[in-house]
Every structure is written in structure tokens, then in C-alpha cells.
Image (tube, rainbow, N blue to C red):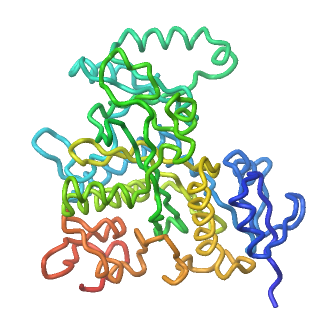
Amino acid sequence: MAGKVKWVTDIEKSVLINNFEKRGWVQVTESEDWNFYWMSVQTIRNVFSVETGYRLSDDQIVNHFPNHYELTRKDLMVKNIKRYRKELEKEGSPLAEKDESGKYLYLDFVPVTYMLPADYNLFVEEFRKSPSSTWIMKPCGRAQGKGIFLINKLSQIKKWSRDSKTSSFVSQSPKEAYVISLYISNPLLIGGRKFDLRLYVLVSTYRPLRCYMYKLGFCRFCTVKYTPSTSELDNMFVHLTNVAIQKHGEDYNHIHGGKWTVSNLRLYLESTRGKEVTSKLFDEIHWIIVQSLKAVAPVMNNDKHCFECYGYDIIIDDRLKPWLIEVNASPSLTSSTANDRILKYNLINDTLNIAVPNGEVPDCKWNKSPPKEVLGNYEILCRVSCCGECVSGRHFPSLRWCPLLFLGGHCWIQSGGLSQMSAAGAGLSITEA
């Protein structure tokens, strides 16, 4: 009989520990032999560090890829998506097709973004094209809304630059990198308030890409009604949906936590906008997620000991166009409400069922392709080895491209089924629908 899984974590959250204990797993310390380590992003750096890291054995798995930051650092995510677009353009891929104004038809899913201070001159050039626009500045390596502010004048950037040069933080270390993005100033509002979506995406392997989306994501609402007025640019209760910020607002509701389930959002949109456009919106969200993962797949260290559950933040504008804002490597496991705790407990339960087959001592050599029966509330977004099966079971009538298929094996979606374009280079076997 196989031994019990030995676990260790440096994240003391009940939704984690209760799941480990439910399975009868045995807690050990980091210095002992362990099989499963749910760790912070700081710890993963040490585990895979050239200087301090160590070699993992086949019965050990961890919950981050070594260079997850290629997706989860704001500047690197944008850099990789831009590179991905250019590569598709160079290949002559129809995915990189542009409209008359030069915008990507299928890959325009991140707001116009520049890195500061490196891209300052490029930003100024873009700013002057539409001087009435609002931009949002974010530090690349921080989370929970920390260090974020909005600007609508170049003088505000110059002031920030001067202030940062004299701050005690910067004087002791290299200047903190920021991204500056065109602010989505026309967000879809519900009850007059801005919101975003937090969606959970599990990646079991990048090559081949196998990823799953959790059906039970949620919306996070601002506590103050939205206004694009310049007088409210500094009011983060109007503009930032992060719970870490909104919980300090006077109107924060501790019972529902300013959250709505994605299923409630879907019902609301179906009743106010119609089923067809709502389905199109969610198809496009799936498309965005898969394309972002395909953008980083070539540079991701696809270590066999790793899996990762990401927190995707999506904003929908008033034309029902979804925008990828950022991806989080360690989405919060803190429970702000009773429903929140249930959701996150079930999220971890379903994640473990996929990452640790049968709850037994892991073998990192397995094919990372679990049977459908164990997916729980996860749904397949992309699993190359069964792409024909996936597509035949789902329909994307609003898209010309199947978002489930791996780069190099794109298929037209036609009324008669799937028409293979170029699967040869990817070594895929595509089943006709």
C-alpha cells in the first residue's frame, strides 16, 4: 500500500490545511522529506535558485512554475504578449490579422501599455495623440492595489518621476519598474458601479498546454459609484476593485463582501443584453486566457514537478469587450465572507484532485491529463492531446478561431465542422467534428 502524502506549506490558510487534513495527508517540516509543498512565490525562488535550490525527486511537486513571473509580472506579461503577436505576424498567421486602423482583430485583449521608465518617450508620443485620455500606473511587482494611481496629465508623470528619485525606498535600491496602461474609462457598470472578474485558471503543463478554468469565479465591485470625472481620479474606491482596498470603504458590505458569482453575472447579462452576446463575451474571455498562456508557453520553464493555479483579472467594457488586466501567481486564499470560504475551499479541493491523482504520493512523470470525472468545477480550456474531442463538445460561434487549439494547429470553425489549417508543425491529430 502506498504511503501517505507528506505536505508542507508556508501559507497558513485554513482552506489549504483543511483540504490536506481531509485527505489524511501528513504534515512535515521543510527540512524533512516531503511530497507536496504549497508555497509562496518568495519560497519558489529559493527552491529553484541556482545558489540555494535543490534537486526535486519524482515524488515531489510544488504549486508554482519556476519562472511564473513571465505571466504574473505586469511588465513581462505584456512583453510576452507583444512578442507572441509579432511572431504570429512573422509567420503570416491569420490570427495576427489587423483592421484598417492597425488594431489586431483577434489579439487586441490587453490595454495599450508601456514600461516605465524604459518606454517613457514612446508613452509621451502616444499620450499626445489623445491628450484627454486617462492612464493608470502600476508597480510591476506589487499586488492588492498597492502603489496604483491614475493620471491624465504629463506633468503628473514628471512629478512622480521627481518624487520617486528622492524617496527613501528608491534611493536604497534600483528604481522600481512601473507599467502605465490606457485606463478602461468606459467599464460596464452594474448598479452604477465598476467591477472586474476574478477567474481561476489551472495549468498542469505548458508543453503540451493543458489548462482548466474554474467555473465558480466571481465579480468584485467598487463601493462607490463610478464616474470618469477628473475630480475623482484619486478616489480608489471608485476605480480599484481590489478587496484589500474596498474593505476600508464606508459602504463595504461584510456579508457579501462586494462580490457576485460569475453565474449571477451571466444571468444578469442574458436578461439585459441577451443570451447570444453573453455567450460571445464568455467565449472571448476563454480565448483571452488561452492566448495569454500560449504567449508565455515558449519561455516558461515547464518543470515536471510543477502546476499552478492563477488568478486572472478581467474587466468588461460597456461594449461587452473583455480586457485582460493582470494575472496573479498567488490569488488570495483569505476568506472575506462565508461564501468566499466555501468557494476557496472547493477551489483547492478540485485543484488537488487534478494535481495529485487519487490523493496518492505523486509521480511527476504522469501525463498531466486527468479523467473528466475528477475535474469537479474545472472545465477544460485547452488540452492538446484531445483537442478534437474538446471542440466537438463545445462551440464558439462568435469566433473565427478555435481558442482551444495549440499554436501551429489553428482550425477554422465552419458550419460543417473543423477544417484543419496547419496542424502538421505541432504534431497534432485533429478529429473532424
Residue sitting at x 34%, y 70%: 405
Residue sitting at x 57%, y 63%: 302
Which of 35/303 is in front? 35
Q: Position of residue 24 (x, y in %)?
A: 79, 76
Q: Is residue 405 above or below residue 172?
A: below
Which of 151/216 is in front? 216
For this view, does 185 lie left or right of residue 120? left
Q: Is residue 392 above or below residue 339?
A: below
Q: Is residue 262 above or below residue 2?
A: above
Residue sitting at x 53%, y 56%: 300
For residue 234, which quarter of the picture? top left
Q: Position of residue 336 (x, y in %)?
A: 60, 47
Q: Quadrant of the C terminus?
A: bottom left
Q: Position of residue 192 (x, y in %)?
A: 31, 36
Residue farthest to the bottom, as pictured: 1
For this view, does 204 lie left or right of residue 278? right
Q: Position of residue 33 (x, y in %)?
A: 86, 67
For this view, does 265 lie left or right of residue 377? left
Which of 336/182 is in front? 336
Q: Quadrant of the N terminus?
A: bottom right
